Structure formats: structure tokens, C-alpha cells
Image (cartoon, coloured by chain):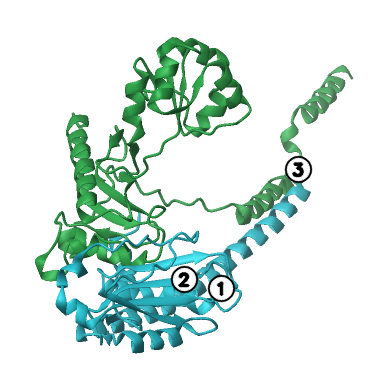
Chain colours: A cyan, B green
């Protein structure tokens, strides 16, 4: 079992990584759901989409836990990777707020092309982003502009945490190098002894 | 003349009988040589390592979490992180996992059982039943949802490694036939061999099928019980019900099993297939955290 300190440091790194960084933003209330559609394979400019999902979507999901973020993957590389953002229409949400709490008939994420983008409901409008041949950071820029999301700045504690983890990483690198040299020296000595023993053993055998 | 002769002879005998008069010169190399050999041997002799192996402690090491200020999370906080990590994954394939660290001795009895969770993780078990062919039991078993029924036909399929089930139940009447078939070599490594101890040789096949359909096995290994506790799509309430059911059962077993050894739950850890492991603090939600149960219930 891992020791408690090791567990803690690994967890700290993962948690701070999901809390801060590009993509950490609070989406406005009119965003109802996000749908991403791209292929399992990268051919045809699908890499940016996958990277966006892998790198930024967890942070978005962490800060907006109630917004469904659906990823639909398939094996049709000829289709352009698209992101669909469902936005509530401003006037209708004011008219009947009860409709927003209704569960949306949205199939959950799939890697077998089972959850295609649904047509928007009556009080929703959609925004499409074409993700083909775009870098993931580029897609994020588009996304932030379209949704008018508010990026979260890391708090002082989070900055301190990040710095602490950074020093930890640097110290670990130094320590790793030191231990590597120690082990190398030890191994060298052992090898030398081994060789000497092999030579000595041979001489003894000849005498007997 | 005679006395002189005798005298000479006695002198000659004397000289012959006394070997001590011989010079001791040839003896010197003898005791020099061993000295030389010995000194050579000494240069080759290995120094024996005197470091002793550390004695393994009797109990598994369990740290004091409060003293070390290890972060523990409410169920909703943990789910928020885990759902964020697993975003965009198909919810049926990703499972919540639970790890129960026990405060227990390294040797001694271990906990091993199966449980029917309130919200099953995997509901579609493929069950095969060994019972006399064409009997009432066979028809009842097929009605209860068994995928394969029979005796010799089933054995033949197993011999050809055509195993399309993941549970095997045997009726008491067919036990002899099963033992005669000698399938232990094939079924044993897969953990499918029916036995009385595992409660897979039974009298009431239908009841057993119904019990094992939603049941999941768990056992203690190295002082930790690990098992899948829920699907990613489960709501916090569903997951809570599952965790509570499991913990209740484990705790009661801990109390039962320990006559002389003590066994108790030390820490409960929740993780997912790809996610980090978060220690739980036995609360559902913290009102200060600003997340609601509803926000974690919907589609991912």
C-alpha cells in the first residue's frame, strides 16, 4: 500500500489540476448543455476536439457540475468534428422558469455513435463550433466567446498550493538524481566485487 | 671377540632404533606450505552479512488520518470530482469503486462473501445450471433466466471451452455427474467450479439464480476490501444506499468473525475506473460546499 504522504501528494496534484488552469470557468445560466461529436481516430483533424475533451472539459465540468456535457464518438472520420452548445432563449426562460428544471431527454455519452446531437427544444437555440483542424486552445477561445463564460482566477490559496507542488516537483527531481548516482556507485562497487570474486575463484580452482 | 661383536651389534641396533637423531630439515617446508595456502584462502573468504531481516509487524499499517490531517470528503464532493474526471465517458462502462481499509492482523480469518446491492452494478449475469436433463428443475431454471441447462451437453460444451456464462450453479442431484466429468481443470482457474462451500451446489436452483443475479462478490485481500459499488450514472442517493448496505454487512461480519482477533473498518475510499481515490468522511453533503444533490443526479 502507498504511504499516506505519497497518496496525499498525488491527490493534491490531481485536484489542483482539475480546479485551476485553462478551462476553469463558470458558464452563464442560459447554457443548458454541451454536446461534442468527433471520431475515435484522429484522421481528418479530430485531434483538437479530443484534446479539448481530455484537457479542458473536466475543468468545465468541475465548475459546472449540473450542466450535461455529452461526448459522442464514432468511427466516421469524414464528418467534421462539431461542438453544439444549447442556450436557453432569453425571453422564454423569464416567461416560464419551471420548464428549465424539466429533465432533458438526452442520451448520455457514448463511443459507439449512440448519442447524436439532439434537436433543440422549443426554448433553446443552438450554436455550432466547427472543431476540424483547430488546436484545442483555439477551440476553447471560440467556446468562451460564444458562451460568454467567466474565467475563474485562481485564489491565493490555490496559487500557494501550486507553488508548493512546484517546489515539491523540483526537489523530487534533485533527489531522484542524487539517488540515481548513489545507486550507480553502489552497483559499480558490487560489479567490481563480483568480477574480483569470479577471478579469485578461478585461481583457487586451478591450484586445487 | 664375542663380547666385542655383541657390543658392535648393540651399537648398530641403537643407531637404527633411534629415529630422533635424524635431522628435522625436511619438516620445515611442510608447515610452511599450509601457512601459505591459508593466507591465500583468507583473501577469498567472504564476509558473511550479519544484517537481520526486519520482523514483519503483526498488523497492517494503518495511519491515523485525523492526526495527519488527511483530507476527507463528503460523498457529493467526491462525486463532483470523479464525475468531472470521467466526463464524456459512456456511463455504463465506468464504475465507481470502493476500497474499505480494515484495521486487521496480517494473518487470521478474512472476510469473503457476496452482497445484493440495492442498485446493482452489473445486472445481466449469464448463468448456467447443471441439473438432470429434461427434468422440472431444468425447465424452472430456464424460466428463471439461465442461459444453459443440462448435464452431458453442458459438460461437452465446457470441454470444448465454449463457456458463454459467468456463473455456474449445480443441483444436488447432479453433483455425482459433475464430479465424474472431471472439469476441475477447466473450471477451477476460472473460478466457476461449483462447490458446497461457495454455495453453488444447491437444492433450490431457482432461488439461487435469483439471489446471485444481482449479487456481487467481495473479499478481503491484504487487509482491503475492493469492489465495484455503482455505475457512473448513479445518483448520490443510489450510491449512498449501496455504500451503506455494503458497510453495514462488512461491519456485522467484522463483529462476527472476531473471537480473538479484532477487525474493524478504518477508512472508506471512493474512486472510479480512471479517477483519483478520495477518502470519504461518512457524510452525504456539506451545505457550505455550494453543490446540491440534484446537480449531480442528471446526465453527465
CA gap between label 1 and label 3 equals 111 Å
Asked if one can make out residue B73 in the rendered structure from this viewpoint, the answer is: no
Tag shown at residue A37 = 2
Q: How many residues crowd around disc 2 within 10 Å: few (fewer than 14), some, or many (20 or more)?
A: many
Tag shown at residue A79 = 1
On the image, the x and y values in percent for residue B6 come to 83, 20
Question: Are the residues tagged 2 and 1 within 8 Å (C-beta)?
Answer: yes
Q: In the drawing, does residue A170 fall left or right of residue B60? A: right
Task: Report the front residue among B204 and B9.
Answer: B204
On the image, the x and y values in percent for residue B166 come to 46, 34
The part of the image, by quadrant, that contains residue B200 is top left
Query: Tag 2's secondary structure?
Result: strand
Residue on which the image places disc 3: B23
> In the rendered structure, the residue with mark 1 lies on which chain?
A
Residue B68 to residue B224: above or below: below
What residue is drawn where x is 58% and y is 19%?
A: B153
Amino acid at each position: 500500500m502507498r504511504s499516506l504522504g505519497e497518496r496525499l501528494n498525488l491527490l493534491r496534484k490531481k485536484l489542483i489540476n482539475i480546479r485551476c488552469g485553462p478551462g476553469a470557468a463558470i458558464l452563464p445560466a442560459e447554457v443548458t448543455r454541451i454536446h461534442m461529436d468527433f471520431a475515435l481516430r484522429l484522421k481528418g483533424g479530430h485531434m483538437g476536439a479530443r484534446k479539448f475533451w481530455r484537457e479542458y472539459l473536466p475543468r468545465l465540468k468541475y465548475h459546472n457540475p449540473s450542466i450535461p456535457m455529452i461526448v459522442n464518438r464514432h468511427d466516421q472520420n469524414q464528418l467534421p468534428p462539431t461542438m453544439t452548445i444549447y442556450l436557453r432563449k432569453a425571453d422564454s426562460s423569464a416567461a416560464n422558469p419551471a420548464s428549465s428544471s424539466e429533465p432533458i431527454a438526452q442520451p448520455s455519452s457514448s463511443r459507439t455513435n449512440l448519442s447524436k446531437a439532439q434537436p433543440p427544444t422549443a426554448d433553446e437555440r443552438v450554436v455550432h463550433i466547427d472543431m476540424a483542424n483547430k488546436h484545442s486552445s483555439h477551440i476553447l477561445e471560440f467556446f468562451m466567446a460564444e458562451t460568454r463564460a467567466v474565467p475563474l482566477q485562481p485564489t491565493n490559496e490555490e496559487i500557494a498550493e501550486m507553488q508548493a507542488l512546484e517546489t515539491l516537483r523540483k526537489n523530487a527531481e534533485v533527489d531522484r538524481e542524487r539517488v540515481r548516482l548513489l545507486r550507480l556507485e553502489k552497483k559499480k562497487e558490487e560489479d567490481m566485487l563480483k568480477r574480483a570474486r569470479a577471478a579469485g575463484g578461478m585461481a583457487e580452482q586451478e591450484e586445487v | 671377540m664375542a663380547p666385542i661383536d655383541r657390543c658392535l651389534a648393540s651399537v648398530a641396533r641403537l643407531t637404527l632404533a633411534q629415529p630422533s637423531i635424524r635431522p628435522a630439515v625436511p619438516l620445515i617446508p611442510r608447515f610452511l606450505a599450509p601457512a601459505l595456502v591459508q593466507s591465500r584462502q583468507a583473501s577469498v573468504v567472504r564476509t558473511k552479512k550479519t544484517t537481520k531481516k526486519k520482523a514483519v509487524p503483526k498488523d497492517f499499517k494503518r495511519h491515523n488520518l485525523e492526526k495527519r490531517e488527511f483530507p476527507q470528503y463528503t460523498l457529493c464532493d467526491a462525486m463532483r470530482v470523479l464525475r468531472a474526471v470521467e466526463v464524456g465517458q459512456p456511463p455504463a462502462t465506468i464504475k465507481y469503486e470502493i476500497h474499505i481499509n480494515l484495521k486487521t492482523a496480517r494473518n487470521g480469518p478474512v472476510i469473503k462473501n457476496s452482497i445484493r446491492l440495492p442498485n446493482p452494478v452489473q445486472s445481466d449475469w449469464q448463468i448456467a445450471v447443471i441439473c438432470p436433463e429434461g427434468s422440472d428443475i431444468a425447465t424452472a431454471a430456464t424460466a428463471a433466466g439461465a442461459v444453459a441447462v443440462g448435464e452431458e451437453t453442458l459438460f461437452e460444451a465446457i470441454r470444448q471451452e465454449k463457456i458463454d456464462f459467468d456463473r455456474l450453479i449445480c443441483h444436488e442431484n447432479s453433483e455425482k455427474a459433475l464430479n465424474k466429468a472431471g472439469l476441475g481443470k477447466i473450471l477451477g482457474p476460472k473460478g466457476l467450479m461449483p462447490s458446497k462451500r461457495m454455495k453453488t451446489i444447491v437444492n433450490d436452483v431457482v432461488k439461487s439464480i435469483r439471489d446471485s443475479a444481482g449479487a456481487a462478490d467481495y473479499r478481503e485481500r491484504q487487509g482491503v476490501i475492493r469492489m465495484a459499488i455503482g455505475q457512473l450514472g448513479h445518483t448520490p442517493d443510489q450510491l449512498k444506499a449501496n455504500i451503506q448496505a455494503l458497510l453495514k454487512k462488512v461491519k456485522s461480519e467484522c463483529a462476527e468473525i472476531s473471537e480473538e482477533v479484532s477487525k474493524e473498518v478504518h477508512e472508506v475510499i471512493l474512486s472510479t475506473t480512471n479517477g483519483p481515490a478520495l477518502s470519504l468522511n461518512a457524510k452525504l453533503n456539506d451545505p457550505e460546499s455550494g453543490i446540491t444533490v440534484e446537480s449531480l443526479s442528471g446526465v453527465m
